[in-house]
Image (cartoon, grey):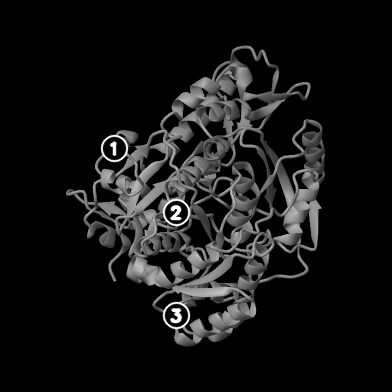
């Protein structure tokens, strides 16, 4: 079979203004980035579309195709005659060059131009990086210029960022020059930065500016919280993001609309595309298909408890994506044997599907499980999963969008449409009036199924301090491993009798949530022994290989 980039390059793309017409967007409302990419200006449609969330069970290290499935569903809905748009996150250069090699779907369910989207796209993530690091430069300049705000250099929490996996930057010393104040600092990956979260949760430019000003940067020497607005920098930060705040319009391989905007990770950030893009898409179409990163214990929980709460959204349907290979992985199958036939691993790992169905039923009953079909799947394995799902009192479908495009997801799309006609019975997992500690415990026990939550002493003190500062009613965003419902990547399937440990608390007052770090999670990933970049190249004619 052809590689993803070979498939993408074999398709003749349509001019982006033709794609815009499908959503009744006028050419004058577009800002063109070449022939096939455009930013959408400030417009509002008249529709009130239905929101479809695609999530997943716990994945293998290679991902399980949520983006491919989302694109396939969108193409299938358009094939059925509905006006539909897929709203996705922008890929980060970190995993593109690290492990994934690309994040624009796969096979015959892709968004294009895939090489542009996977690389610099329209520069949104670079703008976020620049804004983040301008604030860091302003903080250190303030220290150098006399420190009028009396900032404690040892209590500055806002970190620099870059959009590359680089473990060497997790801890650094800055300020080693003459007369500079030396202090310990560190880097987050750009897609885990608070400014990325702010861009994705802001409602407009004014709200963006306000949130940027409200970024907590650290404490003074007398333990007073210091905010970015005290450096009079929010206007400059917003200026850097004036174009990045506008959603990006591209197309699927089948010429259907795709709005791609924002890209926070779900294991270390809130894992959803921008609120502006999602709401715009809902106002322009009958159906909006979106995805939240990693398994439902991460991306979906944050989508539902943070994004839906802040944006007043209610999903009409949740699609839980599963693959035979990820179920086998959760049953202890070695990575090199995931495509080999072995029903025992599947039987041992299918409990992971059960926990994700149970978790999503705590939010809504409008759920369907979809098996993302791979060529290595056998009829026996597929039938086993289908029978198991029936026992969970849940609808089931198979998607072959990877090999067949929208045609391979028609059955799934038809079932989704029927589910979307049901009344919406959506509810949140927790009430904001609960204490921060209680919210952490509710997520840990209800979604991670932990028997106990351990809090390190300094984390309890920080939670108490944040409550006293008036941040107790914020939602919480938990950063943990994506490979398990627990905070331990080695505990696969549906582990019982486990504990989770809260190791760090971070205030993201601009974004509007509290970040809770569990286990060994890092907000700056590292590269593997054989990173994806080793297989990438470009020849003298501009032909790219290795983006797969």
Residue wearing tag 1: 27
Mark 3 lies on a secondary structure that is loop
Asked if residue 400 shows in the view, the reply is yes
Task: Work out how far the residue at label 2 is from the one at label 1, CA to CA, in angstroms.
Answer: 21 Å
Residue at position x 61%, y 24% from top? 228
Find disc 3 in the rendering and name its residue: 377
In the rendered structure, which disc, 2 or 1, sits on the residue that comes first in sequence? Answer: 1
Depth check, front residue: 24 or 36? 24
- Dividing the image into 4 quarters, which one contains the N terminus? bottom left
Q: Position of residue 442 (x, y in %)?
A: 76, 55
Q: Picture coordinates of residue 248 (x, y %)? A: 39, 42
C-alpha gap between disc 3 and disc 2: 33 Å
List x then y, in percent, for residue 87: 45, 50
Pointers 3 and 1 in contact (CB under 8 A)? no
Label 1 secondary element: helix
Mark 1, other Cα within 10 Å: few <14 / some 14–19 / many ≥20 = some
In the image, residue 260 above or below residue 202: below
Residue 267 place in picture, x, y as percent: 59, 53
Q: Residues within 10 Å of mark 2 (few under 14, many from 20)?
A: some
Residue sitting at 82 percent across and 32 percent down? 468
Q: Are marks 3 and 2 in contact (CB under 8 Å)?
A: no
Residue toward you, 226 or 321: 321
């Amino acid at each position: 079979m052809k590689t993803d980039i070979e498939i993408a390059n074999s398709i003749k793309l349509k001019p982006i203004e033709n794609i815009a017409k499908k959503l009744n967007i006028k050419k004058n409302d577009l800002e063109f980035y070449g022939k096939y990419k455009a930013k959408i200006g400030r417009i509002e449609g008249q529709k009130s579309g239905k929101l479809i969330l695609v999530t997943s069970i716990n994945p293998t290290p290679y991902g399980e195709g949520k983006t491919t499935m989302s694109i396939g569903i969108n193409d299938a809905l358009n094939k059925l005659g509905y006006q539909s748009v897929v709203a996705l996150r922008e890929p980060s250069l970190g995993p593109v060059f690290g492990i994934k090699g690309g994040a624009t779907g796969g096979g015959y369910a892709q968004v294009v131009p895939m090489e542009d989207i996977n690389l610099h796209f329209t520069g949104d993530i670079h703008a976020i990086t620049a804004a983040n690091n301008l604030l860091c430069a302003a903080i250190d300049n303030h220290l150098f210029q006399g420190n009028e705000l009396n900032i404690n250099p040892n209590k500055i929490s806002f970190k620099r960022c870059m959009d590359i996996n680089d473990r060497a930057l997790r801890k650094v010393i800055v300020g080693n020059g003459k007369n500079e104040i030396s202090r310990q600092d560190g880097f987050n990956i750009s897609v885990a930065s608070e400014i990325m979260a702010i861009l994705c949760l802001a409602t407009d430019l004014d709200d963006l500016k306000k949130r940027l000003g409200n970024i907590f940067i650290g404490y003074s020497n007398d333990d007073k919280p210091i905010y970015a607005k005290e450096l009079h920098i929010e206007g400059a930060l917003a200026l850097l993001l004036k174009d990045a705040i506008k959603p990006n319009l591209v197309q699927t391989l089948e010429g259907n609309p795709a709005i791609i905007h924002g890209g926070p990770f779900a294991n270390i950030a809130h894992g959803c595309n921008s609120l502006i893009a999602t709401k715009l898409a809902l106002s322009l179409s009958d159906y909006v298909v979106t995805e939240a990163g990693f398994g439902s214990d991460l991306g979906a929980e944050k989508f539902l408890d943070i994004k839906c709460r802040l944006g007043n959204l209610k999903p009409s349907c949740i699609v839980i994506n599963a693959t035979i290979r990820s179920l086998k992985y959760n049953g202890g199958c070695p990575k090199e044997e995931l495509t080999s036939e072995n029903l025992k691993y599947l039987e041992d790992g299918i409990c992971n599907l059960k926990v994700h169905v149970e978790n999503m039923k705590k939010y809504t009953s409008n759920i369907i499980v979809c098996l993302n079909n791979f060529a290595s799947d056998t009829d026996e394995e597929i039938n086993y999963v289908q029978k198991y799902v029936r026992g969970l009192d849940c609808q089931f479908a198979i998607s072959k969008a990877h090999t067949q495009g929208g045609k391979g997801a028609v059955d799934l799309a038809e079932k989704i449409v029927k589910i979307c006609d049901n009344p919406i019975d959506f509810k949140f997992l927790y009430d904001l009036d609960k204490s921060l500690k209680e919210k952490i415990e509710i997520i840990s026990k209800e979604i991670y199924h932990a028997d106990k939550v351990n809090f390190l002493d300094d984390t309890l003190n920080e939670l108490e301090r944040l409550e006293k500062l008036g941040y107790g009613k914020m939602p919480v965003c938990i950063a943990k491993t994506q490979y398990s419902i627990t905070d331990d990547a080695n505990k696969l399937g549906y582990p019982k009798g486990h504990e989770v440990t809260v190791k760090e608390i971070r205030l993201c007052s601009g974004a509007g949530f509290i970040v809770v770090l569990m286990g060994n999670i890092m907000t700056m990933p590292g590269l593997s022994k054989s990173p994806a970049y080793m297989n990438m190249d470009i020849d003298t004619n501009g032909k790219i290989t290795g983006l797969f």
